Structure formats: C-alpha cells, structure tokens
Amino acid sequence: MEKPVIADKSPIPVELKKGETYYYCTCGKSSSQPFCDGSHQGTSFEPLAFEAKEDGTAYLCACKHTKNPPYCDGTHNSL
Ligand code: FES
C-alpha cells in the first residue's frame, strides 16, 4: 500500500465552522494543507470529507499518520 507524504510533523490549527464540510488531504501532497487541492490524482488516496461539529480551532494532522483522521493524535511525535 502507498504511504502518505509527511507534509509536516506538527498539526495545523484551522478555524472550522459548525456544520460545514471540509476535505482533508490524506496523501500529504496538497499545497493547501491540511486540505485537499486535488494533488492526490494518480495515487490511491482520496480526500476525507468531514463535517465540523462545532465552531472553533481544530488541530488537523499534517503528518498523515494519525489514527484519528483528520485530527492530530500525537503520532507525529514517533515519526
Ligand atoms: S500531525 Fe499527525 S498525528 Fe500530529
């Protein structure tokens, strides 16, 4: 299985709006981290659509190895 590119080894804080759908980059190639910009084309990766449950800052995983995508779970510390 293809491995994602590690875009960064720390999470990216983003302001989310409750009820809005976002497309999280899972391949790590997007230039618009942590969101999809279509760069996954030609790979086996697909963006992950998720809905924000509340307004506010969320820390989205940039290393792409979290067990709880799109959120950082601290896995970046062991890469
Ligand atoms: S940035 Fe990926 S687990 Fe923290």
Image (spheres, rainbow, N blue to C red):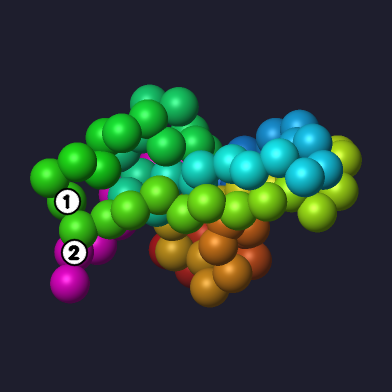
Q: Amino acid at mark 2?
A: Glu
Compared with 65, 33 (above or below) is above
Provide the residue designation for mark 2. 2
Q: Are marks 2 and 1 in contact (CB under 8 Å)?
A: yes
Ligand 1 near label 2 (Cβ, under 8 Å)?
no
Tell me what residue is drawn at x 70 percent, y 35 percent: 14
Disc 1 is placed on an element classified as: loop
Which residue is the extreme one toward the top? 31
| Residue extent of the magenta highlight | 1-9
Location of residue 40 in the rendering, given as x and y in whole percent from the top left corner: 25, 43
Compared with 38, 62 (above or below) is below
Crowdedness of circle 1 by 10 Å Cα count: few (<14), some, many (20+)? few
Q: Amino acid at mark 1?
A: Thr
For this view, does 3 lie left or right of residue 37?
left
- Asked if residue 45 lies in the magenta stretch, the reply is no
Q: Earlier in the sequence, mark 2 or mark 1?
A: 2
Q: CA distance from mark 2 to mark 1?
A: 8 Å
Q: Which mark is residue 4?
A: none
Q: Quadrant of residue 68?
A: bottom right
For this view, does 1 lie left or right of residue 57?
left
User: Residue 75: in sight, yes or no?
Assistant: no
Crowdedness of circle 2 by 10 Å Cα count: few (<14), some, many (20+)? few
